[in-house]
Amino acid sequence: MSASQPRTETSPRISDEIRKTTCYMCACRCGIDVHLKKGADGKKHVAYIEGNRDHPVNHGVLCAKGAAGIMQHLSPARLRAPLRRTGPRGSGQFEEISWDEAMEIAEGWLRPLRETAPEKLAFFTGRDQSQSFTGLWAQAFGTPNYAAHGGFCSVNMAAAGIYTMGGSFWEFGQPDWERTRLFLLFGVAEDHDSNPMKAGIATLKARGAKVIGVNPIRTGYNAVADEWVGITPGSDGLLVLSLVHCLLKAGKIDLDYLARFTNAPVLVDADPRSPQFGLLLRGESGRQMVIDRRTGRPADFDAEGVEPDLRGKLRRAGVTHRSVFQHIAEMYLSNDYAPERVAGRTGLDANRIHRLAAEIARAAFDEPVVIEQPWTDFRGVRHERMVGRPVSFHAMRGVSAHSNGFQTCRALHLLQILLGSVEVPGGTRFRPPYPKPATAHPLPHARSAPGQPLGGPHLGYPQGPDDLCLTDEDTPARIDKAFSWEAPLSAHGMMHMVISNAHAGDPYRIDTLFLYMANMAWNSSMNTTQVMQMLTDTDADGEYVIPRIICADAYSSEMVAFADLVLPDTTYLERHDCISLLDRPISDADAAADAIRWPVVEPERPGAAGVRPFQDVLCDLGAQLSLPGFTEADGSARYANYADYIQNHERRPGIGPLAGWRMGESGVAHGRGGPNAAQIDSYIANGGFWRGEIAPDARFFKPWNMAYQDWAVRTGLIDGPQPYIFSLWCEPLRRFQLAAEGHGRRQPPEHLRARIRETFSPLPIWYPPLGDDQRAPDAYPLHALSQRPMAMYHSWGSQNAWLRQIHGVNPLYLPTALWQEGGFAEGDWARVSSPHSQITVPVAHMAALNRDTVWTWNAIGKRRGAWALHREAPEATQGFLLNHLIHELLPPRGDGLRWANSDPITGQAAWFDLRVRIEKVAAPRVSQPAHQAQASPVGRGPRDVAQKVTR
């Protein structure tokens, strides 16, 4: 008699319905399947989140953050209703009000500003993914004071990439995962691009490709790298230029690539007596000039069939012109960049630098990648094959967040381009809508007038001093001083300077600070303790120095407590969002792609006035204020809500926020076309995204490939072909240098001339971080860094019930020698001092760390009372921020001036220039500084977060 086996359901249903949308637990924008179950109330509730296997970004892979999105959605810290402050700023004391009253207050504050002085509104957003929309709203309002968080995140990387090669790493570039043989990461932590990066590294390792991580800290990607280079912080550019020196000396550069696709052969005015000294020679057409090898005569760089000569030289009208390449050879063959000269500063052995250069050269030139695919370039030359150098790079905030970061990033791009490894098989590739040169981007606009919209976008890419945002008195037109002489190429604004400048009234006073998803009273500000004081300071009449603060957020953050009016946002599962080609899409190197979020559940907050998607609120405010573009001719609202905007707004004829399922002349079309009332429904039916593939003959050499240029026009990325060459010699930088040397109509103030002359080199250079000349190295011998962990992204993450179990505290990690010399043991604490301040924090030992560096995880520490956490939560008692040690200004120089702690070219916040000293101390009860607990407008979360749903 056989024994009976119990019946087991091997694939039980875990939900009643699956709705596909886009994750928002980091910036990867992965596709997710949200499983819904019917609850006891008869409504559908989120029960489980997994990856969407059909999605082009993650192909079903979902990280811990994405899976924990359910806890974000259920967070006890969610706001429930509009709030009006009743207690002192920062106390967290509010009363709930209706949405009608909240909108009436907001309009009452904003309307007089628009009618009289629109620049007195400062509207800045954090990591929102709708910047093309929020920027349009600010432009319609007429304030020059708008930007997002990029200025304190990674603008050096973005701007250096666009000024040099028309695209950058991170969201607009990727390695050729299928073909690269050597992959180098510089300063990359785990929070950005995490799923694609993890999948890509796994692909490389499965193929036997080598991964090298250059980072002072060995965690995450650097921990799984085949080789770790533990460089001294801030010296990455010196290492890169030493590699350039070695490659030039060995002749391991791609001369054909340089001649065809870069400005290396373009002629430069080489006469120091000339007023055009250092500028590129242009012909009657206005195009850059080269010497044609066929004729030995000057020609336009893009003339049909021209063969540019890297050795070109021309004497015209008594002025000598030489090619950019000759300047490159002269500069970088200097022994100043020899490994033996730079080894000490970088913390690396000279032999190791030589070996790294040899390994790069071997991978690039011994095993080129060949695809048998004909293509035609912009000079009309047909190429029978696509040949590439299989070396790729990726870099992020670790090299960007220094005051020498822009030139370091440019140096990295110089290295890539000398190898011929950009936009080729096996190298680094661009994602549509990039590549796009700096000259194809708008210029910044800042001229405001009562009752009028701004003349164009706030942010852009200046080409010289005439494009700066200055008043008629040559003072900064923006409150953050972006696009002024203090930071001429600040393409993402300088959000980290807004509160400090507004408090100082420098360059002028503002009336209303309007923040969206920006925790500027805590982890998103330098000098956190004093910033909180700035937000609460009053003048001689007892009025707040910053008169009004409006804050829009989904959660009870530290910043919310400082607002006078709080507009509560939804979670990402409760609203429409547009991941647009106008902004930050989900394209890959082989296709253009965009996506949506949509309300998979309704935003319900029982017993309260409820929450609204912030973009809907802006649509309504725009209509109430009669902003152009948000109202019809009869004064009625143009858009019912943000979903209506997504479907019906056109940035230019036939081009809207979404590229998929538009209406063409003969029906549905993709890329170009008119509005389609069923567009969002079409996205939902397709899993929440659209993807338009690039034809095989257009997938590589995009800036020069006419098949790609034609495809980009058809798709609506550009209105006409715009091939261009990479800018190894960055002419805009030289124009600013010339102004600092006394040339031109617009020149910098005297105190900035020397800095501009020294740092604005048109070829990449390295210089020590700007604060180093005012810090005695012996007094502050250690570099101090922070980075986000793989399980966190926003400060949101550290109030997530699941993610808190991974990172509930953040010790300061010390290298072995420092640990031993200081007599530290497990459980010890230390006082950490900078030239600005000091903190007292728990410490831990880490061997895989640069010997002169200490570090911690960022944004784990929380202020007591915030985020609905218990006042004795470990994040509040043992967690901490390095931000308290970092001032937004450099130490005073005795000249009475305020010098920003930023890159002098882009204004990028120099977070990682921090220098400290450390000493062992007795453990306090809580980490220091300890601030007074904030009251929580949402109460305190339960001990356990639980939700019971049934079928």
Image: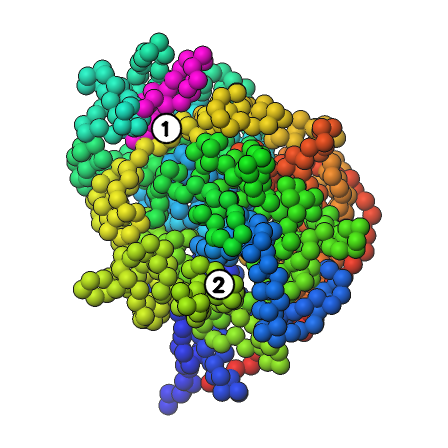
Residue 731 lies in the magenta stretch: no
x and y percentages locating residue 47 in the rendered image: 49, 75
Judge left or right: residue 585 versus residue 825: left
Question: For residue 150, which numbered disc appears in the image?
Answer: none
Three-letter code, disc 1: Leu
Residue at 41% across, 68% down: 634
- The residue pinned by badge 2 equals 626
Three-letter code, disc 2: Ser
Upstream in the sequence, badge 2 or badge 1? 1
Looking at the figure, which quarter contains the N terminus?
bottom left
Question: For residue 418, which numbered disc appears in the image?
Answer: 1
Residue farthest to the bottom, as pictured: 1
**One can see residue 481 in this view:** yes
Tell which of 424 and 666 is nearer to you.
666
Residue at 57% across, 34% down: 474
Residue at disc 2, secondary structure: loop
Quadrant of res 74: bottom right
x and y percentages locating residue 752 in the rendered image: 60, 27
* Residue stretch in magenta: 261-282
Tell which of 69 and 119 is nearer to you.
119
Judge left or right: residue 302 versus residue 909: left
Prevailing SS of the magenta stretch: loop
Disc number lying in front (2 or 1): 2
Residue 269 lies in the magenta stretch: yes
Packing grade of label 1 (10 A; few <14, some 14-19, many >=20) is: many
